[in-house]
């Protein structure tokens, strides 16, 4: 479920952040909460965070030059 093409981040760094976030949320739910299955909850929460992750880890176009001020 976590590797669904529609709801995963675009960049490689974003995918790593997505996986780490899923792992951390799963650990927190299992350690602190009473739910036995934290994986599905973590995947749903990280799917909501995917647009934010995509904005943080945006790709630079090939040949991009930073404009001078």
Image: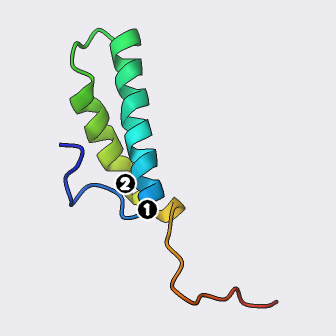
- Residue drawn at (60%, 87%), measured in percent from left and top? 64
| Residue on which the image places disc 2 | 50
* For the residues bearing labels 1 and 2, Cβ distance under 8 angstroms: yes
For the residues labelled 1 and 2, the Cα–Cα distance comes to 6 Å
* The C terminus sits in image quarter: bottom right
Q: Name above or below for residue 55 compared with residue 19.
A: below
| Residue on which the image places disc 1 | 54
Between residue 56 and residue 15, name the one nearer to us: 15
Between residue 50 and residue 16, name the one nearer to us: 16
Q: Residues within 10 Å of mark 2 (few under 14, many from 20)?
A: many
Q: Name above or below for residue 46 compared with residue 9.
A: above
- Residue drawn at (57%, 90%), measured in percent from left and top? 63
- Horizontal side of 67 relative to 12 (left or right) equals right
Which of the 4 image quadrants contains residue 22? top left
Note whether residue 53 is visible: no
Q: Name above or below for residue 30 compared with residue 43.
A: above
* x and y percentages locating residue 39 in the rendered image: 25, 28
């Amino acid at each position: 479920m976590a590797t669904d093409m529609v709801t995963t981040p675009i960049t490689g760094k974003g995918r790593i952040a997505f996986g780490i976030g899923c792992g951390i949320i799963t650990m927190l739910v299992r350690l602190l909460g009473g739910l036995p299955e934290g994986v599905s909850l973590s995947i749903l929460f990280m799917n909501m965070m995917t647009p934010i992750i995509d904005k943080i880890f945006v790709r630079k176009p090939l040949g991009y030059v930073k404009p001078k001020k």
